[in-house]
């Protein structure tokens, strides 16, 4: 009966309780939706980083990444690529020659990362081929084709069909240049990436640099299921012996911290919301207790123990909190669910987001653990909020309380 | 057989500038089956006396012994438990729990005692029928008249099978018809089931029904008459 009394007591003053319930609902709905929003943003960034920039795993010669020394290549990289492509958990493996050097047009010149790729393999490891906005992805048989980002093309003042010159050092430390024809322009929505990366054919770059046949600086690998990344890494490490094998998290620790940090930030955000609501709940329950001093005195007079009175007030507070809490997380979840398939446009601030690698839109992303954990936090908030009102209820002297008119 | 003994009971309130002796060295004993009215003008100390008797207001000095237990030697939690099992209360303002139905109000103290649900239900039904409200089990207090609410309060007071019932001005807020009905029920319960009733009252109709009248004035027993 205590549960029944407590629940009914919550609704004795419907307006007061409803105001509090709505406040809790709106607060938590905002919290849950924000969580879905920011997690979606983080997930998109990571997804983009993997699919466009990093792939799941990269293999290098030891110390290559520190100095990008052209002589630190993987000999017979082509046979390793074939071996990796045969692994059942691997979606694709692609060899790359990687050189940091200069690109110049008639107007301007900039430092870029030049990647010599085999398009048929590269299609299985990155999605750059889907980001072509003008031209094609090495589909035409042209001499020395190159694809570059639209932002770089703007800076160089070049367009589709224009000629650009790549100046670089070969494996014998000679400075050499090669003229390349733009066959494709891409836009990955990551401004920094688009300004600093160009792609040429592996065969063209290996000829220019005098690297041995089959050599490469980097092998990029994508896996079929994200959960298998570490397993595949171990398999590749066994197959390659002394080469450096790293997952995307190891290549870009800040990317892996993104999800962990976002988790913590969102829980802090929810806790802040609950802290604010805590005082509202305490206020509402204090009013409810002070309205019932006589009744509480009567309950103790007829034999209700102080423990039961305390527990009754606690239950009322928890019921009030959970009513708003469950409504809030449900509403927040439903709204997040909707925006999982309907994008939220951030076009107004598009430049800001793309300059740091984010999309100018968000699809929310939320899983069940947030709903459950937030509901538990609401319960804890209710329990904490009940302490002072319940304590005030126990300060009643039954004899004094019963004298109240 | 004496169920209540009051020995030299005193209650002094510390006012701002003066001490007030609300009850001043009262000695009494109450037998089982009594139908006793404590009467006196406002401020005579009768409510304070009943509150000390019921374990609600701690005396400044003296003893209240109920069934050989000095109730004011009990710890606060044991005293609440003692009240639950030994004393029934009927208040002037009915004081029913507004969110509970008549049935649930009567069951409430039995649930606090931990009685099984079948026993609670049967006793509740029987008590509400005894007070003439067998057809209003599921009505909330807001749907009952003052007289009906006070009858539910009597049923609630009887439900835990207490040693005696303390009724503080139970008829003060009732019309004459409801008062008569209530007093008839209480008298019947007293005669047939030997339930002890102790009233504090101004009401002449209660005094008329009472078998013993204790007159209190200035905190002292002025008269103690058996009819």
Image (tube, coloured by chain):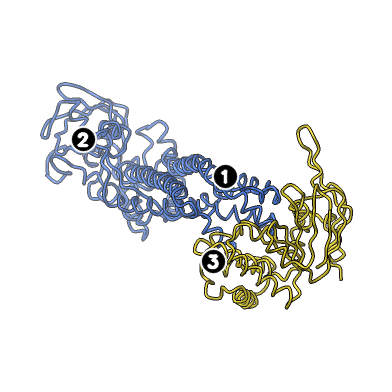
Chain colours: A blue, B yellow
How far is the residue under mark 1 from the one under mark 2? Answer: 66 Å
How packed mark 2 is, by other alpha carbons closer than 10 Å (few <14, some 14-19, many 20 or more), is many
Viewer-side residue, A351 vs A78: A351
Whether the residues at callouts 1 and 2 have beta carbons within 8 Å, the answer is no
Q: Which residue is mark 2?
A: A148
Q: Residue at x 37, y 32 (%)?
A: A69
Q: Chain of mark 1?
A: A
How far is the residue under mark 3 from the one under mark 2? Answer: 79 Å
Q: Which residue is mark 1?
A: A286
How packed mark 1 is, by other alpha carbons closer than 10 Å (few <14, some 14-19, many 20 or more), is many
Q: Chain of mark 3?
A: B
Q: Is residue B152 placed above or below B118 in the rendered structure?
A: above
Q: Secondary structure at mark 1?
A: helix
Viewer-side residue, A361 vs B129: B129
Residue A238 visible somewhere in the drawing: no
Q: Are marks 1 and 2 on the same chain?
A: yes
Q: Residue at x 49, y 39 (%)?
A: A276
Q: Secondary structure at mark 2?
A: strand
Q: Looking at the image, tell me whether mark 1 or mark 2 is earlier in sequence order.
A: 2
Q: Are marks 3 and 1 on the same chain?
A: no
Q: Chain of mark 2?
A: A
* Residue positioned most to the left: A161
Q: Secondary structure at mark 3?
A: loop
- Indicate left or right for B92 with A40 as reference: right
Numbered circle sitting on residue B85: none
């Amino acid at each position: 009966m205590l549960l029944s009394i407590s629940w009914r007591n919550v609704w004795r003053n419907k307006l007061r309780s409803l105001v509090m319930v709505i406040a809790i609902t709106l607060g938590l709905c905002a919290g849950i939706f924000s969580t879905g929003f920011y997690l979606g943003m983080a997930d998109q960034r990571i997804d983009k980083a993997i699919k466009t920039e990093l792939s799941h795993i990269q293999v290098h010669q030891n110390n290559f990444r520190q100095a990008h020394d052209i002589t630190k290549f993987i000999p017979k990289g082509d046979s390793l690529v074939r071996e990796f492509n045969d692994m059942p958990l691997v979606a694709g493996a692609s060899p790359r020659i990687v050189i940091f050097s200069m690109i110049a047009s008639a107007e301007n010149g900039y430092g870029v990362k030049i990647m010599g790729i085999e398009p048929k393999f590269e299609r299985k490891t990155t999605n750059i081929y889907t980001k072509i906005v003008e031209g094609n992805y090495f589909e035409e048989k042209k001499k020395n084709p190159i694809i570059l980002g639209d932002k770089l093309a703007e800076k160089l003042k070049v367009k589709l069909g224009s000629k650009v010159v790549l100046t670089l050092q070969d494996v014998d430390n000679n400075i050499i240049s090669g003229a390349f024809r733009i066959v494709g322009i891409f836009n990955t929505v990551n401004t920094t990436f688009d300004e600093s990366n160009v792609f040429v054919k592996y065969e063209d770059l290996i000829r220019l640099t005098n690297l041995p046949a089959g050599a490469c600086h980097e092998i990029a690998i994508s896996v079929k299921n994200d959960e298998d990344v570490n397993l595949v890494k171990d398999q590749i490490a066994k197959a390659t012996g002394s080469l450096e094998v790293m997952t995307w998290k190891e290549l870009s620790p800040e990317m892996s911290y993104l999800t962990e940090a976002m988790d913590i930030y969102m829980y802090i955000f929810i806790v802040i919301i609950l802290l604010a609501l805590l005082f509202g709940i305490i206020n509402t329950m204090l009013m409810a207790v002070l309205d019932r001093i006589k009744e509480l005195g009567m309950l103790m007079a007829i034999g209700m123990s102080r423990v039961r009175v305390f527990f009754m007030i606690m239950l009322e507070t928890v019921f009030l909190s959970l009513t708003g809490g469950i409504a809030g997380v449900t509403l927040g979840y439903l709204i997040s669910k909707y925006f999982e398939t309907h994008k939220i446009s951030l076009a107004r601030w598009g430049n800001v987001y793309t300059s740091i690698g984010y999309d100018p839109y968000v699809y929310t992303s939320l899983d069940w653990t947030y709903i459950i954990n937030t509901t538990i936090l609401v319960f804890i908030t209710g329990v904490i909020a009940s302490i002072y009102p319940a304590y005030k209820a126990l300060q009643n002297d039954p004899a004094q309380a019963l004298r109240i008119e | 057989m004496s169920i209540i003994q009051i020995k030299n009971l005193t209650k002094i309130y510390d006012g701002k500038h003066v001490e007030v002796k609300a009850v001043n060295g009262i000695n009494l004993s109450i037998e089982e089956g009594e139908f006793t009215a404590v009467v006196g003008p406002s401020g005579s100390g009768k409510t304070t006396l009943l509150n000390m008797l019921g374990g609600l207001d701690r005396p400044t000095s003296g003893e209240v012994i109920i069934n050989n237990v000095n109730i004011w030697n009990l710890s606060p939690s044991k005293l609440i438990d003692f009240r639950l099992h030994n004393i029934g209360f009927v208040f002037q303002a009915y004081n029913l729990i507004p969110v509970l139905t008549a049935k649930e109000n009567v069951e409430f103290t039995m649930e606090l005692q931990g009685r099984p649900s079948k026993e609670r239900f049967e006793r509740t039904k029987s008590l509400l029928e005894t007070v003439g409200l067998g057809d209003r089990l599921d009505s909330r207090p807001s749907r009952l008249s003052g007289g009906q609410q006070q009858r539910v309060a009597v049923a609630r007071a009887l439900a835990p099978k207490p040693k005696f019932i303390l009724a503080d001005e139970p008829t003060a807020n009732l019309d004459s018809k409801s008062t008569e009905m209530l007093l008839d029920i209480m008298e019947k319960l007293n005669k047939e089931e030997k339930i002890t009733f102790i009233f504090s009252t101004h009401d002449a109709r209660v005094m008329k029904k009472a078998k013993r009248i204790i007159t209190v004035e200035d905190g002292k027993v002025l008269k103690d008459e058996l009819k």
